[in-house]
Amino acid sequence: MASDKQDFKALWGGRFTGGLDPLMALYNASFPYDKKMYAADLEGTRVYTAGLHKLGLLSDHELSEIHRGLAEILKEWEEGKFVEKENDEDIHTANERRLGEIIGRDISGKVHTGRSRNDQVATDMRIYVREQLGELRNILKEFLSVFVKRAEVEIDILMPGYTHLQRAQPIRWSHWLLSYATYFAADLARLEQIIERINVSPLGSGALAGHPYGIDRNFLAKELGFNGVIPNSLTAVSDRDFVVETMFWGSLFMNHISRFSEDLIIYSTAEFGFVSLADAYSTGSSLMPQKKNADSLELLRGKSGRVFGSLAGFMMTLKSVPSTYDKDLQEDKEPLFDVLTSVSHSISIATGVLSTLSVNREKMIAALTPDMLATDLADYLVRKGVPFRETHHISGEVVRLSEETNAGGIDKLSLGQLQGVDSRFGEDVRAEVFDYEKSVERRTAIGGTARVAIFDQIDRLKKLL
Ligand code: ARG
């Protein structure tokens, strides 16, 4: 390609006499993946040239020609008619090359006055990422609303709560749902904060040292919808912390998705049978006809590794990049875009899974066992004035008695047997303690399993949405 000197018109070609090694050209090009920022790039140029015009560096006619050309290029991209050329190294050079073809190089040659691809790419990326994160925010809200709806409708369903994956205490299914909604609500809040932090403008910083014609950076920032400017030109062109933060956000979010999926994978096994995935989110085995696998959830769990890998990889790239722009920074795009896509698809799949899975309330109830009420038995005596340390011990003795006598559960022991352990057990002990519904209803404090506490959680989430 580039061996023909006549045709070789790279943007920076002035001081270069030879062509690029063709492999180097491929290695160097970011166009195959950065072209998705075409709209941000055109918008940046539209506003930047308005800034040049304010300085008197472009005439009215030149500015209107430039804006006409940019609008036409945008249309080409949107209609899939943009024709890519061999020397299009990245989205910035491609758009500028096309602008020259449409309005003539005499005018298009002025748009880059005082600008560098260094401040240009940093600007494009911030515009692109804030927009993508805005979309993630919307689908994350939809995901959260599924939790809220199910938690409301299915509030009567009880299930075992676990610690160490051992049955611990009865909870409401809604409580389990809302536990993850609480994580995802925190993810939503974090996302909103990140969008704010990303939204500052590098434009008008030049290659590194600032703008030689005193461009109004506040004007550029305001026109592009930024909240302010990055106050140091060296930082403006080299700061990729917003890329790291976005990928960290994605990694933590995927971590939550992964734990959520892991629970559901366990709950959907035949051994548990608490939930059943809709066919739309399961697949079969090519060998075993009876299999229905929770592939959607396994992929959600698996993708968390990939997303974190992108973050870890780019952190390694970034850690020793010297001031200011170095080509290493071009390596920010592929992992970032992959994170955005993986997270977006994961939210949509998780929303589909959660809104279509069916809950087997009988299986959940059947998994509740009276020993899970041993703490409630201890609490019963606490209400009668016995210190908890003592009641904990007494309840433990009751559990042992039940095991030794093969009673088939602490609830099967007679009142006489219970009183044999401690005389303070009264007539009301069975009705008061051995009732799962009463157990969850007793936990009325904020964050607990009682109906009132669940509705409090639901209300808080509704306010967010
Ligand atoms: N494609 C480049 C990137 O994404 C644009 C910036 C190029 N700047 C430069 N000085 N070569 O990082």
Image (cartoon, rainbow, N blue to C red):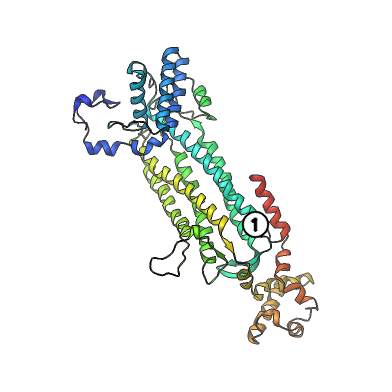
Residue 154 spot, x, y in % from top left: 66, 60
**Which residue lies under the disc numbered 1?**
151
Ligand 1, by image quadrant, is top left
Kindly indicate the quadrant of the structure image that contains residue 441: bottom right
Labels in figure, total: 1
Quadrant assignment for the C terminus: top right
Residue at 43% in and 64% down: 284
What amino acid type is highlighted by mark number 1? Ala
In the picture shown, does residue 332 fall above or below 181? above
| Mark 1 burial class by Cα count in 10 Å: few <14, some 14-19, many 20+ | many
- In which quadrant of the rendered view does residue 117 lie? top left
Instruction: Work out whether residue 344 or residue 237 is closer to the camera in this orientation and state it.
Output: 344
Residue occupying the point 44% across, 31% down: 39
> From the viewer's perspective, is residue 409 above or below residue 48?
below
Residue 418 pos. (x, y %): 74, 82
Of the 4 image quadrants, the one containing the N terminus is: top left
Residue 94 coordinates in the image, percent (x, y): 34, 29
Determine whether, in the image, residue 412 is placed left or right of residue 195: right
Residue 219 in view in this figure? yes
